[in-house]
């Protein structure tokens, strides 16, 4: 459903206030904590100062970090660099959120593009710093950190930075890569976003944007689900040449960068960014692939039986169960559900999450031109995160709210680490979000009274976990094949569709019929465009949380304190250090099977409920 809405607008076009609808009063974010508007004096002042400040920093320190190390001023140089990163981060966060609010608006699109270009110019002056810092003798830097507390504060960041050293290019090449990104990778990212937000899908005579169309795949009526699926396929097919071009271009761009830097595997650069070892990811992928039959295949065969079908059509995969509730969940109920679940775990967690509601840090309504999906953006530590949703009152929307607020709580707590060390690698960034979902699910499950209610809750959770684990690993396998085959030459739309269908069939199993048109559904997944190989982080987080939650259930005291310590650490510790207090080790191949066994157990219970 595309809701009618009226917005209060600053001179900037920044959305504030709330939208009244059948879902209740849906909040719209207030970006004033970043800037009061695109044309505001505060924004213009900071924007105009960025490039000169970066140039001044370059003049002060370029070629002189060795001297700074010797005379004890390196800590000040890092602090100055951190301040510039904070200033730039505030500006690009504001521009990005404005753009996400309506990427079809040409004024916002130009604003976002202008900010990206400024960021590239400023970044070209700052690029030398990390490169030159990595050229300093590691032992000498370590010795200096042992003597200087101010420099030692940045030890995790400096240590982390060294992991990039083997893949660094010379300064001129690094600058070229940076500056060309604006007309290369970033430009194709923007083309994808603006194209996807402008697409309309005709369902029963009504032209819908992608989010409400995808939402119809969860409709109670099979005919509506089919019509939505057909509409998606038709519009994707009409734009298939463009999406194929974008995919081929970005895959080739990545291959060029990987080859110059010396990465062997197509996903190695992502593993490095995630600070996770390839064997750990390979073990996760292998464990999930082995589990396809006993999880996805088994569950969808059960669901087909519940739906009275021999096999599910692809548009039935996320259909509600016949006995499931089809009521619309109002916003105030969703808010209470998540905050109550968070409060049951720790009042601190609920208090932080409540700020998002009370202070307009959430943008919830569906609007034309708004970015699809959902995200939590950390912005900068001197401000706070913002959450984007497309809330439509489905049970999955409540879980999405719990998920994104988990990110938000994590980002608030990690903010104390400062701009250089607050960011958490994607693998662990998904831990807090999935844990928030699990708390919400368990709280709701405990409130069920009848067998039918419990079955509906368990089935919904199993489907979410299949989407998070099985589907995301299938996405990862799809990406791997696309990027590997692209190295041999351009791929046609048909070839990409064949890879998609093969991987989807293997992961979903024989109980799901992949009909005509489904071969185009790879086109709308934004992670393939914005963050290649990002997707395995969801499976990593889900399996990890399953194990983490088991520790929580079996612990008597102290779990919450250790959990918050993990979140506060931000990017200052490796996953092995963060998980050690809980007795967990992601490098142990059996670790992943422990997480997958939780999904197995839920499907077992569903089978038992059927025979009870």
Image: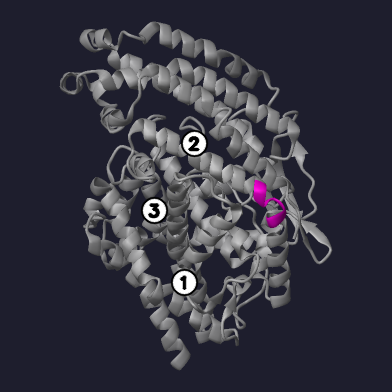
How crowded pointer 3 is (Cα within 10 Å; few <14, some 14-19, many 20+) is rated as many
Q: Which residue is mark 1?
A: 462
Dots 2, 3 in contact, CB < 8 A: no
Whether residue 382 is in magenta: the answer is: no
The kind of secondary structure the magenta stretch mainly shows is: helix
Q: Which residue is mark 2?
A: 253
Going 54% across and 23% down the picture, which residue do you hit? Answer: 119
How crowded pointer 2 is (Cα within 10 Å; few <14, some 14-19, many 20+) is rated as some
- Marks 1 and 2, Cα distance to the nearest angstrom? 37 Å
Q: Earlier in the sequence, mark 2 or mark 3?
A: 2
The C terminus, quarter of image? bottom left
In the rendered image, residue 240, in percent from the top left (x then y), is placed at 66, 52
Q: Which residues are magenta?
A: 237-241
Locate residue 277 relative to residue 338 in the image: left or right: left
Q: Secondary structure at mark 2?
A: helix
- Residue that protrudes farthest toward the front in the picture: 488
How crowded pointer 1 is (Cα within 10 Å; few <14, some 14-19, many 20+) is rated as many
- Residue that protrudes farthest toward the bottom in the picture: 612
Query: Quadrant of residue 113 in the image?
Result: top right
Please say if 459 is above or below 132. Answer: below
Mark toward the viewer: 1 or 2 = 2
- Marks 2 and 3, Cα distance to the nearest angstrom? 30 Å
Residue 106 visible somewhere in the drawing: yes
Going 74% across and 33% down the picture, which residue do you hit? Answer: 106
Q: Which residue is mark 3?
A: 431
Locate residue 461 relative to residue 317 in the image: left or right: left
């Amino acid at each position: 459903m595309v809701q009618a809405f009226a917005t209060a607008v600053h001179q900037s076009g920044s959305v504030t206030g709330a939208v009244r609808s059948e879902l209740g009063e849906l909040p719209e974010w207030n970006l004033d904590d970043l800037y009061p508007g695109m044309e505001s004096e505060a924004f213009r002042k900071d924007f105009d100062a960025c490039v000169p400040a970066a140039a001044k920093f370059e003049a002060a320190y370029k070629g002189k970090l060795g001297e700074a190390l010797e005379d004890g001023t390196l800590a000040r140089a890092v602090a100055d660099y951190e301040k510039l990163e904070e200033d730039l981060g505030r500006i690009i966060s504001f521009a990005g959120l404005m753009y996400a609010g309506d990427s079809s608006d040409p004024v916002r699109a130009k604003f976002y593009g202008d900010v990206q270009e400024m960021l590239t110019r400023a970044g070209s002056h700052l690029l030398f710093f990390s490169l030159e810092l990595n050229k300093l003798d590691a032992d000498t830097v370590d010795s200096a950190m042992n003597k200087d507390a101010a420099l030692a504060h940045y030890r995790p960041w400096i240590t982390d930075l060294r992991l990039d050293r083997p893949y660094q290019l010379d300064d001129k090449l690094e600058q070229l890569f940076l500056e060309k990104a604006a007309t290369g990778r970033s430009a194709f990212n923007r083309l994808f976003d603006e194209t996807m937000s402008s697409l309309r899908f005709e369902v029963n005579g009504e032209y819908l944007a992608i989010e409400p169309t995808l939402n119809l795949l969860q409709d109670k009526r099979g005919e509506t689900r089919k019509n939505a699926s057909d509409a998606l396929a038709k519009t994707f097919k009409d734009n298939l040449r463009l999406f194929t071009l974008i995919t081929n271009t970005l895959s080739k761009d990545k291959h060029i960068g990987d080859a110059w830097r010396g990465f062997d595997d197509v996903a190695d650069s992502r593993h490095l960014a995630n600070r996770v070892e390839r064997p750990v990811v390979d073990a996760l992928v292998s464990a999930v692939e082995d589990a396809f039959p006993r999880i996805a295949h088994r569950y969808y065969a059960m669901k087909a039986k519940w739906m009275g079908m021999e096999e599910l059509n692809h548009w039935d995969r996320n259909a509600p169960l016949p006995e499931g509730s089809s009521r619309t969940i109002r916003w105030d109920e969703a808010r209470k559900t998540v905050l109550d679940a968070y409060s049951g775990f720790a009042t601190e967690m609920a208090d932080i999450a409540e700020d998002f509601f009370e202070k307009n840090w959430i943008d919830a309504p569906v609007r034309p031109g708004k970015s699809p999906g959902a995200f939590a953006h950390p912005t900068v530590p001197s401000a706070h995160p913002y959450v984007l949703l497309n809330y439509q009152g489905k049970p999955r929307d409540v879980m999405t709210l719990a998920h994104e607020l988990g990110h938000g709580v994590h980002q608030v707590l990690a903010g104390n680490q400062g701009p250089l060390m607050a960011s958490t690698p994607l693998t662990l960034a998904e831990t807090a979000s999935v844990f928030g979902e699990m708390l919400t699910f368990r709280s709701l499950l405990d409130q069920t009274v009848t067998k039918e209610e419990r079955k509906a809750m368990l089935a919904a959770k199993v489907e979410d976990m299949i989407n998070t684990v099985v589907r995301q690993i299938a996405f990862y396998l799809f990406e791997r094949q696309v990027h590997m085959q692209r190295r041999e030459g351009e791929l046609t739309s048909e070839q990409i569709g064949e890879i998609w269908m093969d991987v989807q069939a293997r992961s979903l199993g024989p109980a799901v019929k992949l009909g005509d048109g489904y071969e185009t559904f790879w086109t709308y997944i934004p992670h393939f465009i914005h963050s290649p190989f990002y997707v395995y982080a969801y499976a990593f987080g889900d399996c990890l949380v399953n194990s983490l939650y088991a520790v929580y259930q079996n612990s008597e005291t102290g779990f919450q304190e250790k959990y918050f310590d993990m979140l506060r650490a931000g990017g200052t510790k490796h996953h092995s250090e963060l998980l050690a207090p809980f007795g967990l080790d992601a490098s142990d191949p059996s670790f992943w099977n422990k997480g997958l066994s939780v999904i197995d157990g839920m499907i077992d219970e569903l089978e038992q409920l059927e025979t009870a």
